[in-house]
Amino acid sequence: MRFADAVRFIRNDHTNVSKPGLERVNECLGLLKHPEASQNIIHVVGTNGKGSTAMMITNVLVAAGYHVGTMLSPALHGVTDYYRIDGKPISNAQFVSGVETLKSALRSVDVSATGQEMLDPTEFERALCVALILFKMENCDFTVLEAGMGGTNDATNVGQGILTVVTKIALDHTQYLGNTLEMITREKLGIVSTGEPVVLGVNSSIVTETAKQWCKENAHELFLTSIADEGFFPDDRAMIADYQKVNIATAQKAIEVLCSRTEGFVPVIDDFAMEAGIRSTALPYRFDVRKRNPYLIFDGGHNPDCIDALCKSLQTFSGDMKYYIVTGVLADKDYPAMYEMLQRYAEGFVCLTPPNHRGLPAKDLCEWVRRFEKPAETVDSVEAAVAKIKALRKEGHPVLVTGSLYIMADIVSAWNKA
């Protein structure tokens, strides 16, 4: 199988959908003889901070000498971006091998006996199966799975986990998860396996109390997080945001709980590995300061809670400095609340449509932000966005790119090509 064919098998117009339920992924894993069953799975769920926390946990384990497979989402730089082995991207050959194994398993079943729906998994479900195939082939010591939007019905809700880590929970995807923090918290916690301990990141009192009650009802030990020691807070471009302190604290607590287990595979991790792993974590587009004089900052804030955290980081980083905000957003987000907070730091807006079927048209966003009585215009492509960013910075204006993770990679790619 060619690499391009493997990519199309995972990501195409047909698989780019959301379907509730675990039936398809469980059917696929059964055909694969359940590769998840032998893996030490650490689930990372929440609304914000999942990717950073998952990679910190991964990198600490790797720094301590363990072999770790990690699945992240969304995959911003192509479908292989879902996967990390020991914190590094997988090769094209590894990806093709995993896809071939999955495709062969699906091909071996009589569609009339199983039902077409069972053999028609979504992109995320296919990607998860490939992850579990690869991590089993690699004989990883630990498998770190970043959940998608949910918990109970999220495709990553597979296998017997050894630890569930819950990051910041906020109102998002309310049409799927519930319209209160209590409902969303319970939905996220639905991923916890029988007898599994739970680490809860720093959250609101509503989330914390709901988690305490849920864990009591379901006989799970709950470990709460407090803000990290400043000594573990790196001063580099991707880790300087205030919100990373919470993610660092959550990852530290997760490692501490993992090392205190009394059964199964228990890692031994010293302070050197803890600090080295956290300091080596640098996910792109999380308050990512790419250029200075004037600033060019990328931050994938995509819901009101993210934007609130971004605004606090901007205040700490550059005070009341105003930025031209290059932005696009998904139509199902609470974008009025997002831009109401962000407009305080806006000198003007440049709007584009995210490359996603849920993207809000740039003209609609532009019309909305004009109520702030600041310059606002649209661009019709990422290439035009790059040209505008360069022109603004040449004139001395700092630029902030935010609103949706889906625009980040395309702008950077277009910038590099230009």
Image (cartoon, rainbow, N blue to C red):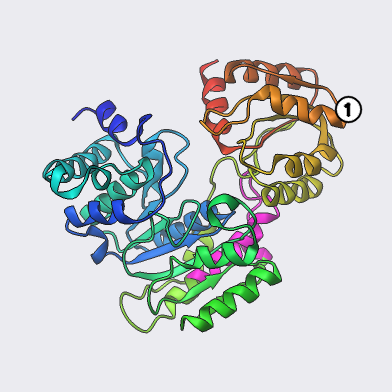
Rendered view: 29 above or below 110: below
Specify whether residue 280 is in view.
no
Q: How many marks?
A: 1
Q: Measuring 71% from the left and 28% from the top, which residue is drawn there?
A: 365
Quarter of the figure that contains the C terminus: top right
In the image: residue 136, left or right of residue 319: left
x then y, percent, for residue 344: 85, 40
Residue at which label 1 appears: 373
Rendered view: 216 above or below 181: below
Say few, some or many: other residues with alpha carbon within 10 Å of mark 1 (under 14 / 14 to 19 / 20 or more): few
Q: Nearer the viewer, residue 125 or 249?
A: 125
x then y, percent, for residue 414: 54, 20
Quarter of the figure that contains the N terminus: top left
Q: Measuring 57% from the left and 50% from the top, which residue is drawn there?
A: 175
Rendered view: 374 above or below 275: above
Which amino acid is tagged 1? Glu
In the image: residue 166, left or right of residue 20: right
x then y, percent, for residue 133: 24, 51
x then y, percent, for residue 260: 44, 80
Specify whether residue 161 is in view.
yes
Q: Nearer the viewer, residue 371 or 3?
A: 371
Dominant secondary structure, magenta: helix
The answer to whether residue 288 is magenta is no
Q: Measuring 29% from the left and 49% from the top, which residue is drawn there?
A: 129
The answer to whether residue 248 is magenta is yes
In the image: residue 189, left or right of residue 296: left
SS at circle 1: loop
Q: Which residues are magenta?
A: 230-254
Q: Measuring 83% from the left and 22% from the top, which residue is drawn there?
A: 375
Q: Residue 212: name its quadrant.
A: bottom right
